[in-house]
Image: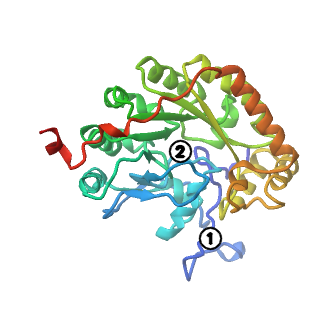
Amino acid sequence: MDESYFKGRGAQIKTGNKFLKAQYVADHIEGLDEPLLENPHTQIFHESPKKIINKVESPDLGMAYSMNPYQGCEHGCIYCYARNTHEYYGFSAGLDFESKIIVKKNAPQVLEQQLLNKNWNAAPIMLSGNTDCYQPQEQKLQITRQILKVLAQYRHPVGIISKNSLITRDIDILQDLASDNLVHVMISITTLNEELRRAMEPRTASSLKRLKTVEALAKANIPVGIMNAPIIPGLNHHEIPQILKAAADHGALTAGMTIVRLNGSIGQLFEDWLRKNFPDRFEKVWNQIRSMHGGNVNDSQFARRMRGEGNIAEAIHQLFRSSKKKYFAGREMPAYDLTKFRKGGMLSLF
């Protein structure tokens, strides 16, 4: 491995930002007294949003609303589609995304105000739709835990997706929500190969910890499934049967998947990462990703962007379907109970 490789980080470069008029660049390295890049320490920034529930307009995401207490994510997953959102804050989708974390400490209070709005009707909210709500900063800030307390108070349905075992800290609240069919949890498991996981998702929980997390939630009667995503041909596609079997063995009720897509700046980040980590199979992986997205790695066409198309994509979907049928037959998530919502707050109890 190159000595300049930033261990513990997914992105190895700082990409440009189309929203900035001026940027530092290293195009003429001979003119620099010192390198512009360094492995950065995590910095925390604060934002006080006026709303926290976001309506999801994309028709292929399978959610109506999302909620994100954090922007940016220390997990550093190289393929993360959320990286591009960091550019709106004037940061890069690369190293900035995983080292400059924006936190919304007032999220629980703002959520309560939105739930109290007379026009709000209960609908499942995905926590989070963008960056992981259980990333490392949550250990001390506990914003997600406070959000869950608000949701439990108002008996409001919520979906959670995470790849961090920290979620087990909140089993007490999740059990309470589950008792009224108000929560679904999805644990993201991309690979069981720890060498690949450490390179691709450097600051996440190990695959074993994630399986143990599934098991702990299932034993607590909290509806839990897994997301085997993203599927990357030539890297992890062959693991689908093993991942689904392991998830089912640990108590998962369902499994989902998406095909990798490298939108915006993520294409440049992933290409650089792939060349440095897997030079022997770069051409194969890169070209197969392109073949699933109409010849481009950046795919914005609804439906195709998440599923892919062509022979390779179809083979992946067939493998997933057959594996899910084999290991998840007779299992499903319980339906949300939207009737439990205390519209108008605690006064509705009287």
- Nearest the eye: 137 or 178: 178
- Nearest the eye: 151 or 194: 151
Q: Position of residue 23 (x, y in %)?
A: 57, 77
The answer to whether one can see residue 44 in this image is: no
Residue drawn at 73 percent across, 54 percent down: 304
Circle 1: residue type: Gly
Q: Position of residue 159 (x, y in %)?
A: 45, 40
Tell me the crowding category of disc 2: few under 14, some 14 to 19, or many 20 or more residues within 10 angstroms, Cα based: many
Quarter of the figure with residue 44: bottom left
- Above or below, 104 relative to 226: below
Count of picture labels: 2
Q: CA distance from mark 1 to mark 2?
A: 21 Å
Q: Which residue is mark 2?
A: 75
Q: Position of residue 110 (x, y in %)?
A: 27, 56
- Above or below, 268 relative to 236: below
Tell me the crowding category of disc 1: few under 14, some 14 to 19, or many 20 or more residues within 10 angstroms, Cα based: some
Circle 2: residue type: His
Residue drawn at 62 percent across, 32 percent down: 255
Quarter of the figure with residue 135: top left
For this view, does 81 lie left or right of residue 309?
left
